[in-house]
Amino acid sequence: MILVLKKGISEKEFDAIIHRIEELKLKPHISRGEERTIVGIVGDSRTKELERWEELPGVEEVIRILKPFKLASREFRKENSVIEIADGVRIGGKEVVVIAGPCSVESEEQILTAAKEVKKYGAKILRGGAFKPRTSPYSFQGLKERGLELLKLAKEETGLPVITEALSIAQLEKVSEVADIIQIGARNMQNFALLEAAGKMKKPVLLKRGMMATMEELLMSAEYILSNGNPNVILCERGIRTFEKYTRNTLDISAIPMLKSLSHLPVIADPSHGTGKRHLVIPVSLASVAAGADGLMVEVHPQPEKALSDGAQSLTPEMFGSLMEQVKKVAEAIGREIA
Ligand code: PEP
Ligand code: MN
């Protein structure tokens, strides 16, 4: 349920509304738009429905959101959410932000080389997994804490903000000390305890679509983070599992404009995991930006053939340079810019 407040509402009226919401053991979520202030009310639906919200002074309109996700919905917020990542780096605005780097942090030399190369070609955020979710327990699991230290070093050397994944609640604190964005991976999209814990933090969270998840399920997972108090959520389309075998996943291009119409949250695309094949990454990146993606996350490795994970889908730095040149033209063609 959302309350649209009157334009000239007094502070006293506003406080009384918030007080009433809290008195009923419900949670207010305030969104100050350009025109109007909106208060989202979440909590027990019976208590919410019984209250005569229309009668509270200062309330202009009561909108009952029929969708199962509330705070993530366009009804709750008409304007696009723009998430502040670091000084001058924002996701969700006019600029399309490119995140690049290796699948995993493998060594000091590897991550520093990758970071310098992607920065040279225009990436604004460095990616690199320290804790890796691998299908087989015998595959490389990441350098873990050492990986985080190396990411910190790469951040200091290049000035690039970093994104890295937390696999569990226990890793959240450690990861957030280094990361500017906490990644919650496809396999954890419905780890509700992890989502709640990330919701209690303020750090931006990149939430990846589960490989078998519908868009509605992705938005419900985002709702877990938002309803726990963290408004800084970025959605990521990374491909879903279909019957097709030539590609690793089927990147759902239509999910980009669909999610953007259902939600105010930024949407980025991951054409690396979305295709699994290096030669498909550039064309699918271009298509994603054309479809309205607010950013791309691309795997780049100084020597893909030697990568400890996801080498087949990793671009060489030179290919990444070519991607950046091409994607610039697509962004311009639809009235956007590459950050
Ligand atoms: C990744 O980004 O390295 C990753 C493991 O992605 P996903 O969770 O989408 O599989
Ligand atoms: Mn990967």
Image (spheres, grey):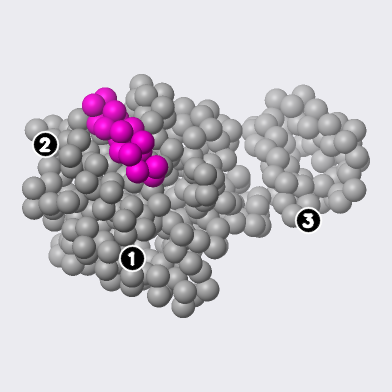
Residue designated by label 3: 35
Q: Is residue 76 left or right of residue 195?
A: right
Give me the residue at 78% from left, 52% from top: 36
Residue designated by label 2: 139
338 versus 168 height, above or below: below
Indicate the quadrant where residue 329 lies: bottom left
Report how far apart the C-alphas of labels 1 and 3 lie in the structure.
37 Å
290 versus 151 height, above or below: below
- The disc, 1 or 2, on the residue closer to the chain's N-terminal end is 2
Q: Image quadrant for the N terminus?
A: top right
Q: Which residues are magenta?
A: 145-160
Report how far apart the C-alphas of labels 1 and 2 lie in the structure.
31 Å
User: Cβ of disc 3 within 8 Å of ligand 1?
Assistant: no
The front one of 40 and 337 is 337
Give me the residue at 57% from left, 51% from top: 82
Secondary element at image label 3: loop
Residue type at mark 3? Answer: Glu
- The disc, 1 or 3, on the residue closer to the chain's N-terminal end is 3
Secondary element at image label 2: loop
Residue type at mark 1? Answer: Met
The front one of 30 and 338 is 338
Give me the residue at 22% from left, 58% from top: 317
250 versus 5 height, above or below: below
Residue designated by label 1: 324
